[in-house]
Image (cartoon, helix red, strand yellow):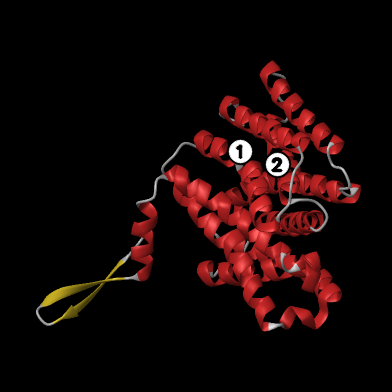
């Protein structure tokens, strides 16, 4: 909630509006669908910006910087308590390990595969969670659509390395686990403390790999500045926008809007990185979007 700071000067109060208040008011004036789309765009621009660092510090160095700065920001914001029970710690450790692995796999895939293709494949993770265990015919249709999209991506991959696609699939598996662990994290911790600690653990997973691969190049001032920008664009800004949007729109509407992420990723990859997708790849993106949106709209409440 935004706060109003009031300083008393003379006989009456003189309100002084904080920057947090002004930012909250400005954010609240934006329609929720626009907030969701802005969050999606922020994530994908952050990924495109991160790819610009690959030539200097590699994909592992980039993910190490992103998670380090994201952890630092979250620690400053939430100031979590480390006095937690065993079950809470077990969930947080698992969450942090999966979060670190998911980011490593995503960036390793991004180093070899166009952004739109990586995000499309990665989206199979939340789709699997949405329809997992269901025996309904309609959910089977969404699964077939998504599978068709994967087949088309494989057919239209051209010279795209197979290991890049496998890293993207691994990121999808990690994303599914991340979703399930996020739910458990919400049950065992309060506010964003668990998230902050989990992000620290994720950074500890990625940092050794990034340091070994990149060495002192990580300490270049311009690299640190871009790394901070990646962390803000890929984590802090979209999380804030999405949380604000979820306060004002139903989760199903939010899920359908989020289904547009593969298309936004493909467009950002084209406009920012010059990554051209073939007709089969664009069709695959559309199939996965349709499957994700359909599964979200028809999901049962407990899903």
Could one spot residue 156 in this view of the protein? yes
| Residue 158 rendering spot, x and y as whole percentages | 87, 43
Specify the label residue 259 is tagged with. 1
Residue at numbered disc 2: 123
Name the residue at the left extreme: 11
Q: Residue at x 69, y 54 (%)?
A: 91
Say left or right for 56 vs 260: right
Q: Is residue 128 visible?
A: no
181 or 154: nearer the viewer? 154
- Within the image, what quadrant is residue 229 found in? bottom right
Secondary structure of the residue carrying tag 2 is loop
Viewer-side residue, 133 vs 233: 233
Residue 99: name its quadrant: bottom right
Q: Residue at 75% across / 78% down in the picture?
A: 218
Mark drawn on residue 165: none
Asked whether, in this view, residue 65 is left or right of residue 1, the answer is right
The residue carrying pointer 2 sits among few (fewer than 14), some (14 to 19) or many (20 or more) residues within 10 Å by Cα, namely many
Percent position (x, y) of residue 274?
A: 71, 54
* Residue at image coords 75%, 43%: 277
> Picture coordinates of residue 181 (x, y %)?
68, 48
Asked if the residues shown at circle 2 and circle 1 are in contact, with their CB atoms under 8 angstroms apart, the answer is: yes
| Residue sitting nearer the eye, 244 or 178 | 244
**Location of residue 199 in the rendering, given as x and y in whole percent from the top left corner:** 66, 63
The quarter of the rendered structure image containing the C terminus is: top right
* 98 displayed left or right of 187: right
Which sits earlier in the primary sequence, circle 2 or circle 1?
2
Question: Secondary structure beneath disc 1?
Answer: loop
Quarter placement of the N terminus: bottom left
């Amino acid at each position: 909630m935004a706060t109003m700071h009031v300083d008393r000067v003379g006989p009456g109060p003189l309100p002084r509006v904080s920057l947090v208040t002004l930012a909250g008011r400005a954010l609240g004036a934006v329609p929720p669908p626009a907030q969701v789309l802005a969050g999606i765009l922020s994530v994908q621009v952050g990924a495109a910006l991160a790819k610009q660092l690959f030539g200097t510090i590699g994909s592992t160095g980039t993910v190490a910087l992103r998670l380090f700065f994201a952890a630092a920001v979250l620690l400053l914001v939430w100031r979590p308590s480390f006095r937690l029970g065993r079950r809470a710690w077990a969930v947080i450790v698992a969450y942090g390990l999966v979060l670190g692995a998911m980011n490593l796999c995503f960036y390793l895939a991004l180093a070899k595969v166009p952004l739109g293709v990586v995000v499309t494949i990665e989206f199979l993770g939340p789709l699997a969670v949405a329809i997992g265990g269901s025996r309904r015919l309609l959910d089977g249709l969404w699964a077939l659509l998504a599978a068709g999209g994967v087949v088309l991506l494989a057919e239209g991959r051209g010279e795209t390395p197979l290991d890049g696609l496998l890293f993207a699939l691994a990121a999808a598996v990690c994303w599914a686990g991340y979703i399930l662990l996020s739910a458990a994290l919400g049950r065992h911790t309060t506010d964003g403390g668990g998230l902050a600690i989990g992000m620290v653990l994720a950074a500890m997973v990625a940092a050794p790999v990034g340091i070994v691969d990149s060495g002192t190049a990580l300490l270049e001032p311009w690299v640190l500045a871009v790394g901070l920008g990646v962390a803000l664009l890929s984590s802090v800004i979209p999380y804030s926008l999405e949380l604000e949007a979820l306060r004002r729109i139903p989760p199903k509407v939010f899920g359908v809007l989020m289904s547009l992420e593969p298309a936004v990723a493909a467009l950002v990859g084209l406009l920012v990185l010059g990554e051209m997708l073939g007709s089969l790849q664009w069709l695959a993106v559309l199939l996965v979007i349709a499957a994700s949106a359909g599964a979200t709209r028809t999901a049962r409440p407990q899903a």
